[in-house]
Amino acid sequence: MKSNIMSKELNRKQLYKLVWEQPISQIAKEYGLSDRGLGKLCERNAIPTPPRGYWAKIQSGQKIKKPPLLFADSTNPDKTILSKTQRVLSSTKTVDKEEIPDELKELIEYEQSPENKIKIPKKLSKYHPIIEKAERERLKWDKKTLNIIDRRRNRILSEFLYALEERGYKAEYNDNIYRIKISHHYEDYVFIGISQYIKRYKRNLTESELKNAIGNSKWVYENEPTGFLMINLYSCYGRISKNFIETESTPLENLLNDAIIEIAKDIFQQRNSRLKRWEEERKHYEKQEQIRKEKEKRVLLVQETDNWIKAKNIRAYVNAVIENRESSMEIESWSKWALNYADEIDPLCRMQEDGFLKLP
């Protein structure tokens, strides 16, 4: 198997053409940039970009004239301004796709089927009980005080929770509407939440801000609300495992089934890890039990050996006493008692059953 380096380079004219063919979010992801980073690159190179709402209008059938590309660089028009380098493995063998467990194949096929797509109505007669409880606790149940984004989030989240429950999941509210517990058979679970996507970027300080700045910092973090919603998927440990961010061309309503697939994968992985951990613990306990039993057998062997020697010594002592003392009723009674005791502690006598010796 050989490794080849492939580079995808774009000059100013090619990037201008691309940003009017695909959303900037998709291009930025492909080239390893943030949406704002790619936007700044276009600004520096005087490349006009589609305005907000452009892709929605295109989908609705509207025709929008794009501005021309001006201020061409006559000295070097083919200068590369954006590049992506990939390492591609080439082989004569066909590369197998990632194997999906049989338990997940049927679920994925179900969620990808068009007739099973989760549909969000424009208006809901009743919200999911979790959302009603959360909004009441936050003193925001007065629908007039909710902005458009909150209302849309509640509508989508409500139908999303209903869809999860129809598929056998259980939703639990844990004092945080942005981290709703989704469990399966009460053993394995994840947390989900829908919130507005906030872009975080560095902004250079202005001259007036620099005069009042503390230390040598020349920039500050800024948070920019985008108006787009996203689904956050948290693992059982509270870490974000994946998020689904809507774009102008892909609303959040079209990402709900994909989110359910990821929830199923995460819970499936948790279950396998839990079963594997249980199996390792079982093997560990079995091994420890074998070690304990082996120690007991060795201790018993030493005890029986000592008792066997003691029994032999008792019998030898009784014979010596009989030889050196005159026979009497007292000697016979004592010798009988001593020999009985020797038989009691002698392991060989205890092992004799049905006329032959049985070893442990």
Image: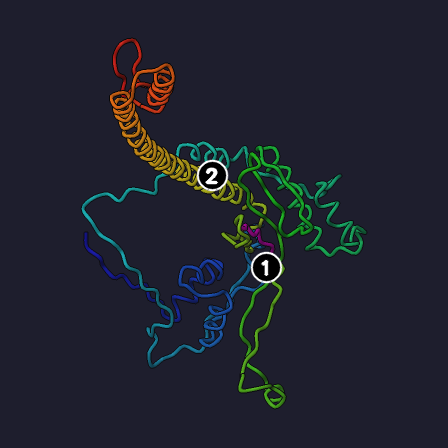
From the image, which quarter does the C terminus lie in? top left
Q: Which residues are magenta?
A: 229-234
Give the x, y percent position of residue 301: 30, 31
Give the x, y percent position of residue 357: 26, 16
Q: Quick check: 169 above or below 24?
A: above
Task: Tell whether 161 sits left or right of 70.
Answer: right
Q: Residue at 63% across / 47% down in the picture?
A: 180
Q: Quadrant of residue 101?
A: top left
Of residues 24 and 298, which is closer to you in this image?
298
The residue pinned by badge 2 equals 271
Give the x, y percent position of residue 9: 33, 66
Whether residue 360 can be seen here: no
Distance from disc 2 to disc 1, alpha carbons, whole Å, reads 31 Å
Query: Residue type at mark 2?
Result: Arg
Q: Quick check: 192 above or below 332?
A: below
Marker count (numbered): 2
The residue pinned by badge 1 equals 197
